[in-house]
Image (tube, rainbow, N blue to C red):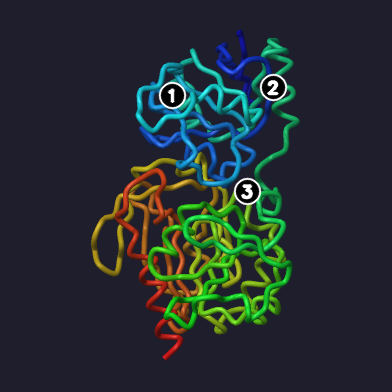
């Protein structure tokens, strides 16, 4: 079925919808991962975005129920060079096209994704519209210009869990609305109780926390610091998530109120919120970091780690108080901030995704570091 994708700056690409009729709008971005498209599709950090895969052949290994990172497809639209409708993988239970259709998400192909990616790299990520119904470029460009901007937009609240839940044995369990200190089941067995704020949390973060000995209760984004204190956890985790961190003023204030109470570990959006709570500033990157091959230097060890990343905003290094904070990680592609830790308080954060899915496992040690902080807090 004929389709068209048009960007707000006037660029348009004729294409084909491999999922049938539909329309969508969002910020068009690109991801450089060669594999892991199902994890990309279900990552809540992509809410409100049309994702372009730079690897040309997508769909060749199908989809399955195990490789999801949330309960639904999160992207606004999916762009590939060539869609493969005959998957070859013993784990596959369906095709990518059927999977996208089941989530009401449009997928397009037969366009020059290399040209689209180069255009985004030069001009920056921007708003776009995909349609099989309106094939007039001028009309779609006007609609793209009127689409909501990512700057100033709170998307985290919309992807957060409405009610607390426990993560145990690789699955979620329902809890009462306001859990207290009686919520923990296995703390006496030596496990560490973690209150995890859900701003768009990925399942593999929860899997990794469980792997290193944590019992996790996942909390809605609007949970207050008083409610966390009633639970009396051993540590607080701040998750990844979509959108601009600056509008999340309530979350920033809650995080600030938990400084010094328990060890805190933030990833991605959690890293940005910690930076804001500590008096720093954030800004929008030109085209963001999205892929499974981003080189990051660990300044504490001198080692280079290949990391999985998905973010369009960053913390301004110059805005941080260096007397209070130690810069621990830097991106080797553009010298943007990738991690920091507090010099006195048990607080650490990284901008990238140590849980991967998809991506390498170079940074898995950060989950063990969080446990060490909690262990030290117990003693």
Is 84 rendered above or below residue 168?
above
- Location of mark 2 (residue): 23
- Is 228 left, or right, of 110 in this rendering? right
Residue 170 percent coordinates (x, y): 48, 56
Neighbour tally class for label 3: few under 14, some 14-19, many 20 plus, Cα within 10 Å = many
Q: Decide which of tag 1 and tag 3 comes sooner along the chain.
A: 1
373 vs 354: above or below: below
Give the Cα distance between marks 2 and 1: 21 Å
Which residue is painted at 58% across and 64% down in the image? 166
Residue 250 coordinates in the image, percent (x, y): 72, 66
Residue at horizontal 58 percent and vertical 67 percent from the top: 217
Q: Name the residue under label 1.
A: 59
Q: Is mark 1 on a helix, strand or loop?
A: loop
Name the residue furthest bottom.
Answer: 379
Specify few, some or many for label 2: CA neighbours under 10 Å numbering under 14, 14-19, or 20 or more: some
For the point 48% across and 46% down, the residue is 310
Image quarter where the N terminus lies is top right
Q: Do the residues labelled 1 and 3 touch (CB within 8 Å)?
A: no
- Answer left or right for 359 relative to 130: left
The residue singled out by tag 3 in the image is: 243
Q: Where is residue 53 in the image (x, y as percent from the top left)?
A: 45, 29
Q: Earlier along the polypeptide chain: callout 2 or callout 1?
A: 2
Q: Dividing the picture into quarters, in which one does residue 48 lie? A: top right
Image: 329 above or below 140: below
Q: In this view, does 126 lie to the left or right of 290?
A: right
- Please tell me which residue lies in front, 272 or 270: 270
Mark 1 packing: few (<14 Cα in 10 Å), some, or many (20+)? many
Q: Which of marks 1 and 3 is in front?
A: 1
Select label 2 or label 1 by which is in front: 1
């Amino acid at each position: 079925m004929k389709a068209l994708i048009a960007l707000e700056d006037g660029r348009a690409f004729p294409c084909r919808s491999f999922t049938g009729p539909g329309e969508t709008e969002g910020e068009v971005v690109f991801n450089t991962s060669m594999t892991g498209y199902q994890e990309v599709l279900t990552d809540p950090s992509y809410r409100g975005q049309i994702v372009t895969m730079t690897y040309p052949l997508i769909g060749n290994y199908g989809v399955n129920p195990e490789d999801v990172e949330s309960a639904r497809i999160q992207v606004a639209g999916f762009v590939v060079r060539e869609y493969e409708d005959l998957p070859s993988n013993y784990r596959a239970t369906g095709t990518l096209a059927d999977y996208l259709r089941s989530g009401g998400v449009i997928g397009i192909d037969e366009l020059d994704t290399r040209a689209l990616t180069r255009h985004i790299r030069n001009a920056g990520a921007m708003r776009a519209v995909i349609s099989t119904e309106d094939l007039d470029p001028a009309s779609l460009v006007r609609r793209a210009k009127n689409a909501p901007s990512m700057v100033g937009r709170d998307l985290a609240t919309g992807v957060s869990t409405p009610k607390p839940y426990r993560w145990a044995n690789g699955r979620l369990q329902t809890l009462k609305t306001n859990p207290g200190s009686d919520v923990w089941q296995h703390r006496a067995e030596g496990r560490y109780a973690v209150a995890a704020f859900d701003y768009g949390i990925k399942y593999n973060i929860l899997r990794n926390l469980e792997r290193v000995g944590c019992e996790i209760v996942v909390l809605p984004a609007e949970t207050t610091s008083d409610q966390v204190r009633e639970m009396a956890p051993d540590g607080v985790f701040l998750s990844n998530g979509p959108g601009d961190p600056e509008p999340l003023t309530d979350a920033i204030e809650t995080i600030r109120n938990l400084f010094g109470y328990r060890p805190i570990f933030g990833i991605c959006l959690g890293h940005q919120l910690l930076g804001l709570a500590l008096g720093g500033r954030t800004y929008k990157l030109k085209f963001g970091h999205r892929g499974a091959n981003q080189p990051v230097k660990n300044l504490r060890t001198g080692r280079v780690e290949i990391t999985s990343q998905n973010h369009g905003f960053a913390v301004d290094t110059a805005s941080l108080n260096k007397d209070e904070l130690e810069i621990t990680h830097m991106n080797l592609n553009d010298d943007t901030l990738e991690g920091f830790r507090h010099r006195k308080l048990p607080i650490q954060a990284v901008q990238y995704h140590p849980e991967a899915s998809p991506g390498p496992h170079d940074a898995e040690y950060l989950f063990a570091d969080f446990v060490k902080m909690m262990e030290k807090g117990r003693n």
